[in-house]
Amino acid sequence: MVVNCPDCKKILVEFDQGSGNYHCSNPSCNFQYLELMTGKQHRKEAKIEEHKTAVSIGNLDKKPKRILVGLAIESTLLSMGYSIFDKVTTKLRDEYGANVFDCLENPKYLKKILERNFDKKVQNVITKSIHAILGEFAYYESVREFLEELDGKS
Ligand SMILES: [Zn+2]
């Protein structure tokens, strides 16, 4: 039988045959598993927690990550040469009224600027370098989401 995830609509998988527990295989989905017999739904607690506190702690918590991501972008661009750094930061300011520290929440700004102004090769070097710097911080959900958006996966 086919059961779809109530959150992301993907097909749920029964891990242990006959257990009646249907899991969502989508890693970015909050839904964990459904007990088919009782209809009880289980969701990942940690993520819900993060959303609940998004207003209070979330803002405090976001700040260091904004700086982290901003500095990773800045140092990558500078390592590519000042003209590239200047071009990207100028475009961020002129087109979006933003700076590198706004990119955590708005990865599309950077992505669009890179796509419009640089060839694929340069784009790849820049995104790879940002990945290399931020890779070890990817356990932070917000950093991971930024990297995924930059790659165009989401
Ligand atoms: Zn799901």
Image (tube, rainbow, N blue to C red):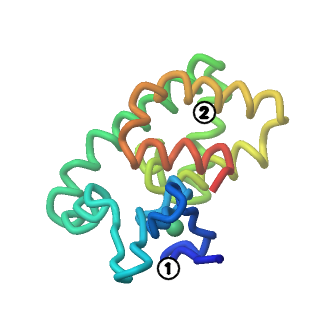
Q: Residue visible at 77% across and 28% down?
A: 122
Kindly identify which numbered label has been placed on residue 114: none
The residue furthest front is 18
Label 1 belongs to which residue? Answer: 6
Q: Residue visible at 39% across and 73% down?
A: 35
Looking at the image, tell me whether mark 1 or mark 2 is earlier in sequence order.
Answer: 1
Question: Quarter of the image containing the C terminus?
Answer: bottom right
**Crowding at mark 1 (Cα within 10 Å: few <14, some 14-19, many 20+):** few
x and y percentages locating residue 12 in the rendered image: 57, 67
Distance, label 1 to label 2, CA atoms, is 46 Å
Question: Quarter of the image containing the N terminus?
Answer: bottom right
Mark 1, secondary structure of its residue: loop
Label 2 belongs to which residue? Answer: 86
Q: Residue visible at 45% across and 64% down?
A: 19
- Front one among 74 and 29: 29
- Front one among 67 and 37: 37
What amino acid does circle 2 point to? Asp
Ligand 1 within 8 Å, label 1 CB: yes
x and y percentages locating residue 69 in the rendered image: 43, 37
What amino acid does circle 1 point to? Pro
- Left or right: 76 with respect to 52? right
x and y percentages locating residue 60 in the rendered image: 18, 51
**Crowding at mark 2 (Cα within 10 Å: few <14, some 14-19, many 20+):** few
Q: Residue visible at 34% across and 82% down?
A: 38
